[in-house]
């Protein structure tokens, strides 16, 4: 730390991203929940000489084709859509500007929530998940902090039915609930359906997981016009042009290509079911995932051992070295071929153990 670093932030513990190894081609990378598929063919089409020439201009502001495409997808108004440089940026604005009474979130959830809280000096309350990793919305009754729920949750993969989200919203209509739907397209139902009834709901989504654009950095917030106006106030007080020209075009193209989106997400769901069944047959414990990953506990060895032995065999998964989940690893659902390699490596590891 330099002598210039603000003492208020000296204890800041940054988020630890999953490893992005240089030799990707030699590894089977199942550690950061990226898609095994390329972006939509329509994304390739919008990257051309004309769009590249336009890079000399600042990106469009206001309602763009991306806002319209998102609005059409969900049957909402484009003014209910906010765009950000990844959903991480949208979440940062929520912590910075929408937590007047602090924040509340689970002990096992997206690791960025406590980091944002610390970064912006927001006090936060940790509400532990139940023994079986489920989230009981009753545990939030009477809390006044802005509630952050990843639904489905990471790293557990568990999904909360919309009726549960509704119950959470009903507890206190003066309390904002931010639902982070990074994984909603892998089997869940978006809370966007609840927006007409609840103005205390803000939904965050990303193009990184189900739309094959993790590297483009694009996220959304969807909510009431008033909440979206607040998000824009925050964005325009920080970096109005945080979403670049090309990403705006790529996002709109991906959002419009419904057929490709459906094909990719259904393939992930199919392979997830197959791998879950195969691993359970081998004695793994796996909560029911509604995401593009599984949270898996191998029989007879710790999460760390399994992680390390997979790595020796060229397969990268995510291990979180915290006591509550030390027997688990998080495995991204890749292509069927990649998952067959995971199963083969697992058989080899289990034989050895
Ligand atoms: C991946 C992920 C994000 C971040 O997505 P980006 O749009 O790539 O910033 C946000 N929330 C959860 C729960 C995630 O898993």
Image (cartoon, rainbow, N blue to C red):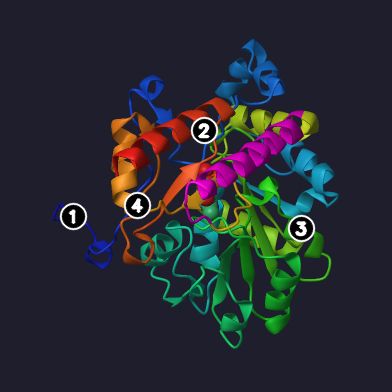
Q: Which residue is mark 1?
A: 4
Which label is found at residue 192?
A: 3
Q: Which residue is mark 4?
A: 303
The spot of residue 318 in percent (x, y) is 39, 45
Q: Nearer the viewer, mark 3 or mark 4?
A: 4
Q: Is residue 352 above or below residue 107?
A: above
- Residue farthest to the front? 351
Report if residue 200 is visible in the image.
no
Q: Nearer the viewer, mark 2 or mark 1?
A: 2
Left or right? Give the position of 159 relative to 320: right
Work out how far the residue at label 2 is from the one at label 4, CA to CA, in angstroms: 18 Å
Quadrant of residue 265 within the rendered picture? top right
Residue 263: percent from left, percent from top:
74, 31
Q: Nearer the viewer, mark 2 or mark 3?
A: 2
Distance of label 2 from label 1 (alpha carbons): 48 Å
Quadrant housing residue 226: bottom right
């Amino acid at each position: 730390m330099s002598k210039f670093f603000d003492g208020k932030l000296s204890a800041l513990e940054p988020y630890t991203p999953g490893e992005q190894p240089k030799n990707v081609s030699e590894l089977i990378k199942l550690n950061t929940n990226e898609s095994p598929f390329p972006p939509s063919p329509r994304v390739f089409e919008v990257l051309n000489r004309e769009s590249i020439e336009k890079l000399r201009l600042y990106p469009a502001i206001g309602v763009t084709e991306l806002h319209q495409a998102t609005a059409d997808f969900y049957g909402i108004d484009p003014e209910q859509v906010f765009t950000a440089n990844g959903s991480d940026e949208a979440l940062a604005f929520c912590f910075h500007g929408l937590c007047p009474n602090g924040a509340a979130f689970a002990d096992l959830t997206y690791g960025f929530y406590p980091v944002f809280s610390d970064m912006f000096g927001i006090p936060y309350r940790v509400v532990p998940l139940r023994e079986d990793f489920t989230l009981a919305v009753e545990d939030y009754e009477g809390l006044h902090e802005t509630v952050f729920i990843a639904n489905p949750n990471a790293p557990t993969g568990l999904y909360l039915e919309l009726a549960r989200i509704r119950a959470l919203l009903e507890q206190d209509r003066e309390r904002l609930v931010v639902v982070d739907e990074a994984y909603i397209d892998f089997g869940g139902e978006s809370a966007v359906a609840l927006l007409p009834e609840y103005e205390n709901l803000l939904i965050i989504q990303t193009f990184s997981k189900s739309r094959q654009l993790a590297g483009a950095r694009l996220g959304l917030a969807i909510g009431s016009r008033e909440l979206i106006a607040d998000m824009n106030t925050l964005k325009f007080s920080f970096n109005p042009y945080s979403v670049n020209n090309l990403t705006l075009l790529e996002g709109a193209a991906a959002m419009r290509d419904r057929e490709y989106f459906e094909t990719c997400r259904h393939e992930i769901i199919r392979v997830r079911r197959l791998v879950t069944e195969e691993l359970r047959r081998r004695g793994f414990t796996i909560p029911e995932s509604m995401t593009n990953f599984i949270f898996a506990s191998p029989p007879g060895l710790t999460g760390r051992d399994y992680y390390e032995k997979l790595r020796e065999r060229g397969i990268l998964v995510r291990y979180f070295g915290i006591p509550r989940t030390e027997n688990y690893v998080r495995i991204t659902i890749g292509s069927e071929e990649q998952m067959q390699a995971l199963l083969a490596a697992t058989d080899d590891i289990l034989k050895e153990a």
